[in-house]
Amino acid sequence: MNPFRLDGKISLITGGGTGLGLAMAKCMADAGAKVVLVGRRENELRKAVESIGEMAKFVVHDVTKVASASELATRAGEIAGGPINILVNNAGIHLKKWAVDTTDAEFAAVINTHLSGAFALTRAVAPAMIERKEGSILFITSMAAVFGIPQVAAYSAAKSACAGLVRALATEFSPHGVRVNAIAPGWIDSAMLRGAFAGDPARAQRVLSRTPLQRLGDPTDIGNAAVYLCSPAASFVTGVMLPVDGGVSIGF
């Protein structure tokens, strides 16, 4: 049996319609998992499901509506035909703004999407995983949880909190067979990154100058890492934040 396969698993992926979420969904489907994509934009989700094929379904949902997280988990299991084995907390928004200009509402929106929404959904799916003594929960953090980066104070706060949450949840869930890990993507070629670099060529050059592989990552790099961390191949891995960053975090 190939330990990197996900045959028979059902994966719930938030922010799954585009970017890194879609890349992870495609890689997991290729590894044998059924995937349920969650997002706010039905058109994007439909296109994503069509690109993946019969292994994919979708649910339109806003993760910031934390009171309905349990309903989302139930609905996802129903349309996939079984319990959720893998949860990928990937949904996110980006805010590029100086800290002193960031409003309370903007700060709260970032925190609610990246942190509160992820925690609520994790809390919804974890009990069934714990009861079955099997499951994998994956958070997508960021280099902003590793380095101090200007103009992303809200995003840095949210992603740093997610990194701490991974460690705390791993200590609670792992004795019950449920692993909790994170991926910290480096600078990956995506719509969100292009937005962050917009009008700031110096920032883009700084990123490449400190990346030993001398290129941006591809979304598939994150997808393959997600498959590994959620597969039997990583059965003794929990509580880690794996940088997939071309070497940026070695800090040279």
Image (spheres, rainbow, N blue to C red):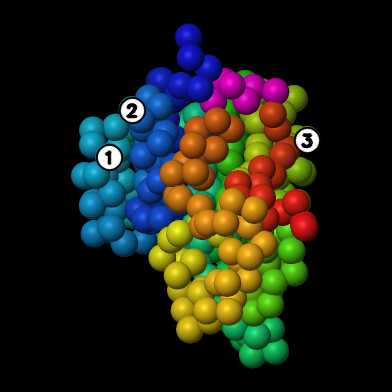
- Marks 3 and 1 sit apart, C-alpha to C-alpha, by 35 Å
Asked whether 67 or 160 is in front, the reply is 160
Q: CB of mark 3 within 8 Å of CB of mark 1? A: no
**Left or right side of 39 for 240:** right
Q: Which region of the structure is painted magenta?
A: 230-236
Q: CB of mark 2 within 8 Å of CB of mark 1? A: no
Residue type, numbered disc 1 = Ile
**Residue at x-position 48% and y-position 9%:** 1
Asked whether 24 or 250 is in front, the reply is 250
Name the secondary structure under disc 1: helix
Name the secondary structure under disc 3: helix
Q: Position of residue 126 (x, y in %)?
A: 60, 36
Residue type, numbered disc 2 = Gly
Instruction: Point out the tag, 2 or 3, that comes first from the N-terminus.
Output: 2
Asked whether 45 or 73 is in front, the reply is 45
- Marks 2 and 3 sit apart, C-alpha to C-alpha, by 30 Å
User: What numbered label is drawn on residue 81?
Assistant: 2
Quick check: can you spot residue 138? yes
Q: Name the residue under label 1.
A: 52
Position of residue 91 relative to residue 82, above or below, is: below
Quarter placement of the C terminus:
bottom right
Badge 1 crowding class, 10 Å Cα cut-off, few under 14, some 14 to 19, many 20 or more, is some
Q: Mark 3 points at which residue?
A: 171
Q: Position of residue 52 (x, y in %)?
A: 27, 40
Badge 2 crowding class, 10 Å Cα cut-off, few under 14, some 14 to 19, many 20 or more, is few
Quick check: can you spot residue 106? no
**Left or right side of 167 for 26:** left
